[in-house]
Image (cartoon, rainbow, N blue to C red):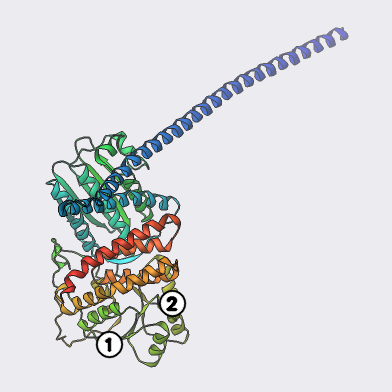
Amino acid sequence: MTDTATLQQQIIQLQQELASTQSERDNLRLSLSEMSDNFEQLIAKQTQALKQARDMALSASKTKSEFLANMSHEIRTPLTAIIGFSNSLTDETLSERDFTLATAAITRNSHHLMEIISDILDLSKIEHDQFELEQVDFDLFSLLHDVEETVSAQAMEKNLWLNVNIQFPTPQIICADPTWVKQVLLNLCSNAIKFTKKGGVDINVSYVASNNKIAVDVIDTGIGMNAHQQGKVFEPFSQADTTTTRRYGGTGLGLTICANLVKLMQGELYVTSGLGKGSRFSFDFAIAPLKPGAIVHFPHQLLVTEQGDEEVQSIPNLSGHILVAEDSIDTQNLVSLYIRKTGAQATFVNNGQIAVEKALAHNYDLVLMDIQMPLVSGIEATQILRQVGFAKPIVAFTANAIKQELESALDAGCNDHITKPIDKAAFYQILSQHLPKSNTSVTDTKNDDLFDDEEFNAIRGNFIRRTPILMAELRQTIDNKDWSHAKVLVHTFKGTCGSLGFKHLFTLSKQLEDGVNNPDITQQQSITSLLGALQQEIEAQSKPYDKR
């Protein structure tokens, strides 16, 4: 009986073990089935991802191929005109009128070709992190006026309106990168005019105090874009559709460059649009903390009117003695003119070594220290003065106001900085901060337009008459590939052109400075072309002064 019970228990135990084994087999089968399903899903996802990557690669390849085809067309068009009209100049029977038309066509198409190449090079610089932002005090309203003047001719040719609307309160003197702000604005405005047949373009500008940014809207009444086109408009090598380049011209890189520049300025560029309803391109950019008195609350407080004509500017009555270390005679003369109008006195030296000696030997109230000078640089001179206990304010004076140089000047012991080209409002603001006020009125005329000032025009004339010597020296250094000397010459030339109001010469010399700072093979032809353009502009600017 006992054996039977034991046997039954063993049978029951065996059945339980068999049932457990079956359950484990069922679980294992279920797990294997789930693993198979997951593996199939993973394979499907990876296949889809590979397909998407392949489609994106094919799309990118197609887009770049289309871009190269378009660029071939864009580059060949002006080249064909340049070659054709150049050949026509060898015709001895060519009339004077046809000769003039041919040379004008060559110049026009050369500039157009340079714009195309500049777009391509600018994008390359951005992609390789070769762009450096400057931090410069500049007049925002003057910059807006310059943009308006530049693009208004394009608008007038198409009978379009162009309005610049400033929402107050907004700061007038801001610290940012005026070159790239202006480039973004010019590109957006030119695009807006290009794609607008009727109506016009509005440029709205405001100050966002909450994040200390300037906000800009460029609004047109043009052809507009659908959602798909808006999604592609900031992509490199793309325009709204494949026919845009053929119909309207351009590289399709301008908006990509703008978006990248705005990003570098800690802002964002975006678009809202609708087919047939026009487009609104909006962007903002960060500015340095505002200085006291920078905010303008009402239009009548501006130094520049809506039409861009200079109003009476309040030049402060100051006292004190300023030591100015500056090696350019033209800049010395201009600074002397500005300082004299305040009632203060100025002593000028040509290099950093003499600046140190003078500053320690006399009781100056302020030192304006040019950063790049012979013998001893402005940075070195400032360090020496601070090391020996010189406590008076020193203001850096520089035409190369990149962030690193300004930081170096402040680290050396400078209290502030003034940039070249000299902005009158910013210059007088700096002087007012560091010099005592004076109750004595200045007998010299203080509120006139500089371009009506005989002494200012004499300074301009003397500079222009010396430019042939400067250009000869510059050409010699470039021919000898003496790039370090060329950098100094073109740097000084650029600052003087800007300070004396030769805007086109300043722009050309800034482009030339970029070239001599990176004198690789691809820049050689550009440098030669820019030297020729500088020479032509100098000759044009010399004509009014030849009769004096």
Q: Quadrant of residue 340?
A: bottom left
Residue at 40%, 75% (x, y): give it: 372
Quick one: 74 or 429, which is closer to the camera? 74
Is residue 383 left or right of 254 when viewed as pictured? right
Of circles 2 and 1, the one toward us is 2
Q: Quadrant of residue 226?
A: top left
Which residue does the numbered mark 1 point to in the structure image?
320
Using the image, determine if residue 12 lies above or below residue 521: above
Using the image, determine if residue 452 lies above or below residue 141: below
Quick one: 75 or 333, which is closer to the camera? 75
Quick one: 536 or 432, which is closer to the camera? 536
Residue at the far bottom: name it: 361
Amino acid type assigned to the residue bearing label 1 in the image: Gly
Question: Could you tell me if residue 176 is visible in this image?
Answer: no
| Label 2 or label 1, whichever comes before in sequence order | 1
Amino acid type assigned to the residue bearing label 2 in the image: Ile
Residue at 79%, 10% (x, y): give it: 11
State if disc 1 and disc 2 touch (CB < 8 Å).
no
Quick one: 98 or 56, which is closer to the camera? 98
- Mark 2–mark 1 distance (CA, rounded to whole Å): 24 Å
- Quarter of the rendering occupied by the C terminus: bottom left
Using the image, determine if residue 242 lies above or below residue 351: above
Question: Could you tell me if residue 109 is visible in this image?
Answer: yes
| Secondary-structure class at tag 1 | loop
| Residue count near mark 2 (Cα–Cα under 10 Å), binned few <14, some 14–19, many ≥20 | many
| Secondary-structure class at tag 2 | helix
Disc number at residue 379?
2
